[in-house]
Image (cartoon, helix red, strand yellow):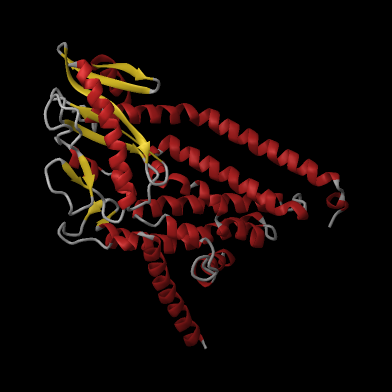
Amino acid sequence: MSKRKKNNIYPLIFVFILTFTTASLLMGVQAWLSPRIKTNKKMEKLRSILTISGIDTDKINNSELEKIFNKTFSKTELKPGFWRYQRNSQNKTIAYIYPLQGKGLWGPVKGFLSTGPKKWKIKDLIITYQEETPGLGAEIATSSFYQKFRGKKITPKPDSSKIVLQVKKEGQTRNKNEVDGITGATQTSKRFNQLLTNSLKMIVEDRKELK
Amino acid sequence: MRFYTRLLKQTIWHENPIFHQMLGICSALAVTTNLKNGLIMSLAVIVISMATNVTVSMLKTFIPRNIRLITEMIIIATFVIIFDQLLKAYYYQMSKTLGPYVGLIITNCIILGRSEAFALRNRVLPSLVDGLGNGLGYAMLLLPISFFRELLGAGSIAGHQVMPANLEPARAILLAPGAFLLLGIFIWILRGIQLHHAKEAE
């Protein structure tokens, strides 16, 4: 071993140079990629909103996506961080989109829910973020799960405040307003039901005011 | 050239990180729920283990012995963060499904183990080959395990449904016990083949 390495000050200098180099490298990479990552996140959000308002976004590229959004959608902040989006067509609103947000089993679950002109029925639903168990709870973010909510009644009658839509254990659903949960992911299903009920309460109140 | 092919064969087969050295098993169990995850994760480990081995090998004369582990960790973490950012920028959907597991490559024992056991003592080119071999050795188990876990646990291959819809998939295979079971079976088969070869050679 050389003299240099036995010196006490040498490791300090080495670590300083190493961290300085790696930190600069990472800062450079971040500066290069972060605009792209931000765009990805924003586009994913727009794509989700467009999809559940009834627009097929598969063949639309990002720049067109933003154009369509700006042209046909309006948004209102209901409370800090909670936005309602409306899809307008010929001066009429044809879809109302609300954010879904709450706790799952391991972390937050986020998504969007849309109602059509018929305000007591769900038009569509999408889950965009979850941290549930891969292969089990994480299935809530697959279309085969959230497509089950299409056309379900939120309240029994247009002006009622009673929420009838429920996520139940698979095989225990008894009526049309109940949706099968995920087998093997009872906790996620339960929490998702809670999250959905909370959001639906808010949505029902908001739609009452909207008329 | 023969030296390198021998080295590659040795790292992939005779000293395979997973079924021989039992390294990197935690991530092998966690990300193998479907084939796509397994594929991207294998690619990540191959790239990062090569990059780390090369860097450590280049710096080996400068790294102070008493702080070599922390140095290796810093190098690994840097490459992992870069890979994660690249994935988020260019393959956003994939980065979402892999979630925290890409970041957890930092704690993958294969990469730290190889930089400690090989790259610190060898020249750059052999270190590169060693990194490649170990990454491939990892992929060699990750891919079949994720293939079978997805097929049996979800009834699909790379997201395409292949099993008939009325056949209930064995969800337990997607949980940790299922992963242990499959990994155990694979280790048993591969070690069996190795033993058979060794006996024949005698």
Q: Residue at the far bottom: name it.
A: B202
For residue A24, above or below residue A176: above
What residue appears at the point 26 percent right and 51 percent down from the top-left corner? Answer: A182
Could one spot residue A6 in this view of the protein? yes
Identify which residue, A34 or A189, lies in the foreground: A189
Could one spot residue A61 in this view of the protein? no
Quarter of the figure with residue A141: top left
Residue A115 on image: x %, y %: 19, 27
User: Which quadrant is the N terminus of chain B positioned in?
Assistant: bottom right
What residue appears at the point 50 percent right and 83 percent down from the top-left corner? Answer: B198
What residue appears at the point 38 percent right and 63 percent down from the top-left corner? Answer: B145
Quarter of the figure with residue A26: top right
Q: Judge left or right: residue B98 versus residue A25.
A: left
Quarter of the figure with residue A27: top right
Q: Judge left or right: residue A167 versus residue B137.
A: left
Residue A60 on image: x %, y %: 25, 28
For residue B196, above or below residue A20: below
